[in-house]
Amino acid sequence: MSNAHLCAIGVMAKAPQAGRSKTRLCPPLTPEQAAALSAGFLRDVTENIATAAQLAPIQGLIAHAPAGSEPLFGGHLAAGTGFVLADGAIDAPSGVVGFGRCLLHAIQGMFDAGFGAACVLNSDSPTLPTAYLARAASILLSGGDRVVLGPAEDGGYYLLGMTAPHARLFANIAWSTDTVAAATRARIAALGLEVVELPPWYDVDEAAALDRLTEELANPGDGFAAPATAEVLRRIGLGMVRNAA
């Protein structure tokens, strides 16, 4: 069956492993706690995509590295989640380096699989509103060569979607800085592409954002409920961890 009617959403993710997952949250968390939280994030992000797929034609994927690491995600993903390799081992234009090569690899892999549109999504926003994912897919599948940008509050982006693999969107970007979204907007403009922006959201990649997440889950708003993340935080006893830090 053709995938042309579907928007693929690939979550840029590492398998949850102590000492390799969410290391910027150590401290206040231990490596084992950070890995458990990473697993909770993966479950909730992929369940969120599966929920969005009830509202728009979406296929959720894990954009992973290295090759062969798929079994390490076992038990941590929503049913029906697929995989696409994103280790950056591809031919890429000049200036597409580092994380940009991994993003481009994921995007190219999704288009090579015949999807009508493709998005890369971070794995650090477990409470991202489901409606944002459904809207991104609907916009991209509505026809025309366009880009959807989901800006993060820290200056990066949580989602970037497109209807064709525009490699230049990943060239000469200073990754992991607060200029990523602005540089991407400038690149979109230089390519003459239409862009639709989603509302901003936040990443959970440092202690202050972890506190914000804990508060959000205690006082739910419009975001995804993130039950797996909430359960991990309950098991960790986050309040005790933060007070001891």
Image: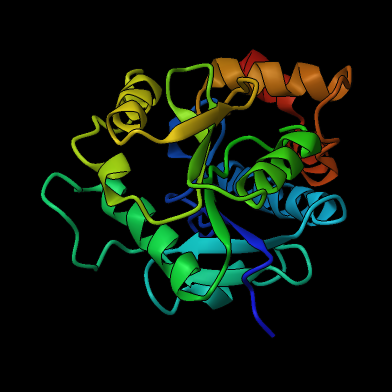
Residue in view at x 47 percent, y 17 percent: 154
* Position of residue 212 measured from the top left corner of the image (x, y, whole percent): 68, 16
* Position of residue 136 measured from the top left corner of the image (x, y, whole percent): 66, 41
Q: Is residue 157 left or right of residue 5?
A: left
* Position of residue 73 measured from the top left corner of the image (x, y, whole percent): 60, 67
Q: Is residue 189 above or below residue 219?
A: below
Q: Is residue 69 left or right of residue 167?
A: right
Q: Is residue 28 above or below residue 47?
A: above
Residue in view at x 56 percent, y 57 percent: 117
Colour scheme employed for the rendering of this structure: rainbow
Q: Is residue 48 above or below residue 77?
A: above
Residue in view at x 55 percent, y 20 percent: 207
Count of picture labels:
0
Q: Residue furthest front?
A: 144
Q: Is residue 233 left or right of residue 117?
A: right
Q: Is residue 131 left or right of residue 245?
A: right
Near-viewer residue (41 or 88): 88
